[in-house]
Amino acid sequence: MPFIEESDLLELHKDIDKAQIINERLLDQIKFKNKELKKSKIQRNVLAGITAFFLIGGLAFTSFTAGLSSSSSFDKQNNNLLVSIDSLDAIKTRIDNLKLQNEELSLVKEFYLAKEFLQKEKIYSVQVKSFVDNNITLASEALTNTLFVKTNPFYSYSLGNFETLQEAQSFRKQLVDIGFQDAFVASYKDGKRIQIEDPY
């Protein structure tokens, strides 16, 4: 393993600390988004219930008034029919908008389910660095496929989240080819490292 200067080691510790802070911020953002998702789901369900109520009420009212107006002139019946068609078009437009919102919420839900999967299932990742300090500037809030794990007394920085060992080993080989000679595959579960895996 290459020799690391003490000043470089201190810098790496600082970098790991920064990464931990970023990770905590991301977790806080996920919790906030979960709350927003629950609120919007409740609002959507209430709105759908109200829309259904008004739709049924509107149809009942239209049916009732259509029965009363059967003795009226032909022009009055046409006017009622046009009003009913206009209100049905507005309701159809509202239903289409609700379907679109539901699709967007489904995408957000899939993201949170994937994040939950990573925390509950055994995954494999390729560790590229380990630092003493939890102060890392290598990470960005845009990086979602990374792990920052405390393995006493170090903080490890890993890339990739793979379901199989073979996928992780293949990714490790690519990293070694571009210069990460010390990279190795480790398995994780519940956000903690289980073991270091065979590199081949």
Image (cartoon, helix red, strand yellow):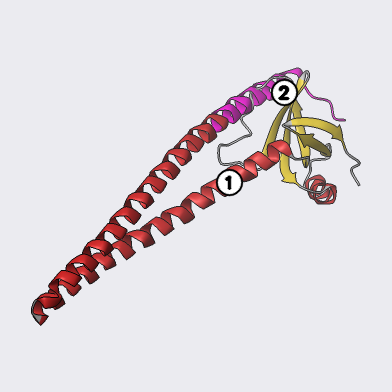
User: What's the magenta region?
Assistant: 1-26
The tag earlier along the polypeptide, 1 or 2, is 2
Percent x, y for residue 106? 52, 51
Percent x, y for residue 80? 16, 71
Binning the other alpha carbons within 10 Å of mark 1 as few (below 14), some (14 to 19) or many (20 upward) gives: few
Distance (Cα) linking label 1 and label 2: 36 Å
Against 117, is 81 above or below? below
Splitting the image into 4 quarters, where does residue 113 fall?
top right
Give the residue drawn at x 41%, y 47%: 45
Secondary structure mostly taken by the magenta-highlighted segment of the chain: helix
Binning the other alpha carbons within 10 Å of mark 2 as few (below 14), some (14 to 19) or many (20 upward) gives: few
* Mark 2: secondary structure: helix
Q: Which mark is residue 111?
A: 1
Against 17, is 62 above or below? below
Amino acid found under the numbered disc labelled 2: Asp
Asked whether 125 or 100 is in front, the reply is 100
Report if residue 20 lies within the magenta region: yes
The residue under label 2 is 8
Q: Which mark is residue 60?
A: none
Amino acid found under the numbered disc labelled 1: Phe
Residue lying furthest bottom in this view?
74
Splitting the image into 4 quarters, where does residue 6 fall?
top right
Left or right of 190, for residue 96? left
Left or right of 9, for residue 35? left
Give the residue drawn at x 82%, y 37%: 186
Percent x, y for residue 18? 60, 25
* Mark 1: secondary structure: helix
Report if residue 64 lies within the magenta region: no
Asked whether 27 or 180 is in front, the reply is 27
Give the residue drawn at x 69%, y 21%: 13
